Image (cartoon, rainbow, N blue to C red):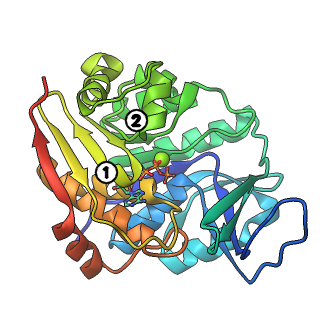
Amino acid sequence: MANLARIATVTLNPALDQTAQATNFHTGRVNRVTSEHADAGGKGVNVASFLSAYGYPVVATGLLGRANLEPFEDLFAEKGITDRFVKVPGTTRVNVKLVDRIRELITEINFPGITADAESVSAVMETVLALADDGVRWFVLSGSLPTGVQTDTYRQMVEQLKARGCKVVLDTSGIPFDRALSARPHVVKPNIDELQEVVGSSLGTLEEIVTAARALADGAIELSVVSMRDRGALFVTSEAAVLAVPPKARIVSTVGAGDAMVAGITHGLLSGLSLPEIARLSTAFSLGALGELGPNMLPKEDIEAFAELVEVTELKIG
Ligand SMILES: Nc1ncnc2c1ncn2[C@@H]1O[C@H](COP(=O)(O)OP(=O)(O)OP(=O)(O)O)[C@@H](O)[C@H]1O
Ligand SMILES: [Mg+2]
């Protein structure tokens, strides 16, 4: 694929995922770790990794703590991601995942991360807008906001990027998601819990989910994708709704299944694919991420083979 478009991802709250295998893990006693693995990540960083693995030139920005930069810098070098992160004092948050293969349990311990000040956030905003002015047309804004960042930061970013004619894919949750909806990002990808939280009611049937997705921002979102873990995902526009169900997958790591889907959706839209094709391919991206440790994806051939196994159904709703 020649001349793929440049894509920028924004991660205001990256994380260092520290995965440790601890067989027969129990609380309240000493547990032995048999193997460990550290992944520089955070949602937008993962999206950047997946897109660069697929051949896109990717620029990643956001906030990173200076105290534990090295794993991030190593990742950017390894993946060929252009690093435009604003470096701030402190430690980027560390998420520990204790994987117990015997009991099939994953225990997570999430440390607090950096506290950002208004100047750092402004520096990220300036970087983002400079990238837009430099010709980047696609922006993926992903993940939560660290302490100290105003909840309407994504709203402002979406507004300013749209004013410059850029396409914005947003994957966040809670109040920052709710606030940003009024700026009408082009694409959103809540999981079912995040959608329920933002609409304030529980959604049982596919019809309820599609109706809620269509109602986001008074129907102004071009594409809303609601992911539902192993139940697949719904791809909803004002005119169509497509359900994509993955085959039973061998799961090596659940890190970044949703982020891989975001990468796949972005790739699908940039490639001008139809909605069912986007649904199929982005689900295959997720499967590709589930089959690899950390924010890594299986090779392109495997992704394309997975795509054939995804069950895609066009729903007649509304
Ligand atoms: N256990 C699983 N088996 C098969 N496919 C899965 C599984 N978990 C996730 N997927 C695939 O990945 C997609 C996205 O996963 P999920 O709904 O968990 O996203 P998410 O909650 O946003 O994840 P993330 O934690 O990365 O943000 C699903 O729609 C599905 O296609
Ligand atoms: Mg997600």
> Local crowd at mark 2 within 10 Å, few (<14), some, or many (≥20)?
many
Q: For the C terminus, which image quadrant?
A: top left
Residue topped by disc 2: 161
Residue topped by disc 1: 232
Q: Give the x, y percent position of residue 163.
A: 35, 29
Question: What secondary structure is marked by label 2?
Answer: helix
Residue 175 lies, with reference to residue 296, above or below; the image says: above
> In percent of the image, x 76 and y 36: which residue is there?
117
Q: Between 157 and 190, which is closer to the camera in this rendering?
A: 190
| Amino acid identity at mark 2 | Leu
Mark yes or no: residue 84 visible. yes
Ligand 1 lies under 8 Å from the Cβ of mark 1: yes
Q: Between 60 and 305, which is closer to the camera in this rendering?
A: 305
Front label number (2 vs 1): 1
Residue 32 lies, with reference to residue 134, above or below; the image says: below
Q: For the N terminus, which image quadrant?
A: bottom left
> In percent of the image, x 63 and y 63: which residue is there?
105
Q: Give the x, y percent position of residue 130.
A: 48, 46
